[in-house]
Image: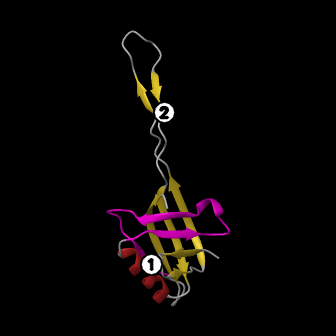
Amino acid sequence: MATITNGSTTYTPALVQGYEAAYQVNTLQHDLIGNPEPEYTFQVGSLRRGSMSLVFDTLADAAACAAAHRMPGVFVFTDPARPTADMSYVTAPGQEVRVVQDPTSVTRATLVVPFHEVTP
């Protein structure tokens, strides 16, 4: 079961409905006068940026996790079903954390969290 921890509190979604991540490639291309082939400077790519959709059994649980994401700090996401998604992250600057109530259920809600991975 996936967990999100912010130091003292652990949140446990019932389901990770979606996970999307991208990396920025930082390789530089240099076009040189008199050289038909470009030269390249290789640099390490960025850490992951993306979003995840987490389904909680209750609207109150989703709202509590959303409230935690409004506070500054580093979160740790772990998911045994997706070990390559495990990471430390912060809420993406300037993005919206959204709580969406399930239209087919009175109790379930989805929390959409935009993230930027950070080194622990």
Q: Which mark is residue 100?
A: 1
- Which of the pair 88/62 is nearer the observer? 88
Image vertical order of residue 38 relative to residue 7, above or below = above
Tell me: residue 20, above or below residue 104. above
Residue 95 in the image: above or below residue 10: above
The image position of residue 73, as x and y in percent, is 39, 71
Q: Split into 4 quadrants, where in the image is the N terminus?
A: bottom right
Residue plotted at (39% across, 63% down): 92
Left or right position of 93 against 2: left
Residues at marks 1 and 2, CA–CA distance in whole angstroms: 41 Å
- Start and end of the magenta stretch? 73-102
**Residue 94 is inside the magenta segment:** yes
Q: Residues within 10 Å of mark 2 (few under 14, many from 20)?
A: few
Classify 10 Å Cα crowding around label 1: few (below 14), some (14-19), many (20 and above).
some
Is residue 81 shown in magenta? yes
Residue at horizontal 36%, vertical 68%?
Answer: 96
Q: Residue at x 35, y 64 (%)?
A: 95
Quadrant hosting residue 35: top left
Residue picked out by circle 2: 42
